[in-house]
Image (cartoon, rainbow, N blue to C red):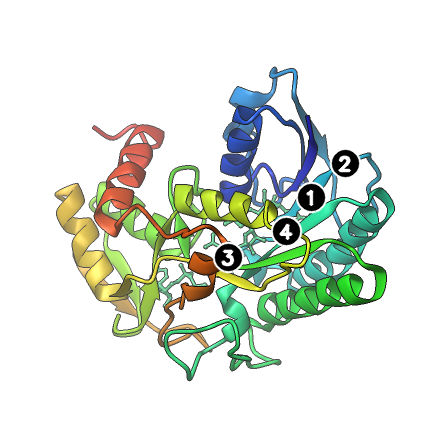
Amino acid sequence: MKTILVTGGAGFIGSHLCDRLIKEGNNVICLDNFFTGDKENILHLINHPMFELVRHDITMPYFAEVDEIYNLACPASPVHYQYNPIKTIKTSVMGSINMLGLAKRTRAKILQASTSEVYGDPTVHPQPESYWGNVNPLGPRSCYDEGKRCAESLFMNYYQQNKVKIKIIRIFNTYGPRMHPNDGRVVSNFIVQALQNKDITIYGNGTQTRSFQYIDDLVEGMIRMMNTSDDITGPVNIGNPDEYRIIDLAEKIIKLTGSKSKLVFLPLPADDPTQRRPDITLAGKLLNGWKPSFDLDQGLELTIRYFRKKLNID
Ligand code: NAD
Ligand code: UDP
């Protein structure tokens, strides 16, 4: 039986990962400072004998005997990571140093939840792992993008210098149940607006693209990555290559919810990437043929069902 630490475990992705790790019979320590996380996401696990919840901020050191670490702690929505940019950088940089130090001491394997944002506003499309990216180091997104890029560098250096067993995945836009209704990201915003028949807020003209991955596909990819042999460090892209314009996502959500919402167009935030789509060839090779199994309609149906219940809408 393994003891597995999940930082950011009360968040959207972290809580699904905790569920899966508990189901597979592991001891799970869920560590979270509850900045964007929610106890409700893990309420059903609280009394489980193999589950332990710890309120802790990863910018401070943490000590425990663990076999594996999934480092997910970091606000992920632009609204939240830009709320306190210095704290966001500290979480990625000091948080990674603390968790890598823990991995070094306990000889644990450690996986970093990196992001497609390391590619910035990409000029190569779709994005393979070999692409170095196009990030504005001074813009409003840089606290997140550069923090995550620095974290990748730290992981690589701990691997090369200290032989820590590292895994880096670059996660592309992921959605599903347990996203916070006020999370601010596009899928949750549009679903909540559509279910309440409120205006759907499109930033810019809606021609920018994203590729949306359902949460269960990501969790499967993460666990497969953790279980690869020690010589495989990544980075490996984990995402769904089906690419959509934001305006088409809005129309789809209106249709699936039967909503009366209208589209409204608001200013495009600075440095908003114009296109994004993962090249997942490497993930297929290294992760036993891993590929997404949920298409957008299926994933949206499940997510809409969740929000209907959460918001008491029938
Ligand atoms: P989320 O905001 O729901 O979860 C982040 C969790 O980390 C929250 O529970 C929050 O309270 C916790 N946290 C934040 N700062 C912390 C700190 N200093 N110490 C301890 N806990 C802290 O977001 P998510 O979508 O679940 O994202 C999880 C991870 O995956 C993040 O690292 C994010 O960068 C990465 N990621 C997510 C996506 C996506 O599309 N969802 C894409 C790329 C990368
Ligand atoms: N977006 C939008 N309306 C919203 C929220 C987001 O049009 O209410 C756009 C946003 O400008 C971006 C895309 O949707 O082009 C994805 O935004 P999100 O914040 O979900 O993720 P990220 O930009 O980090 O990929």
- Element marked by disc 1: strand
**Residue count near mark 3 (Cα–Cα under 10 Å), binned few <14, some 14–19, many ≥20:** some
Residue 28 spot, x, y in % from top left: 65, 29
Marks 4 and 1 sit apart, C-alpha to C-alpha, by 16 Å
Q: Residues within 10 Å of mark 4 (few under 14, many from 20)?
A: few
- The residue beneath circle 2 is 66
Can the viewer see residue 261 in this picture? no
Horizontally, residue 44 falls left or right of residue 214, namely: right
- Residue receiving disc 1: 69
Q: Against 103, is 53 above or below?
A: above
Q: In the rendering, at what x and y percent does residue 146 appear? A: 63, 72
Q: CA distance from mark 3 to mark 1?
A: 20 Å
* Residue wearing tag 4: 229
Q: Looking at the picture, which amino acid does disc 3 mark?
A: Leu
User: Which quadrant of the structure image shows residue 159?
Assistant: bottom right
Residue lying at 82% horizontally and 34% vertically, measured from the top left: 65
Q: Quadrant of the N terminus?
A: top right
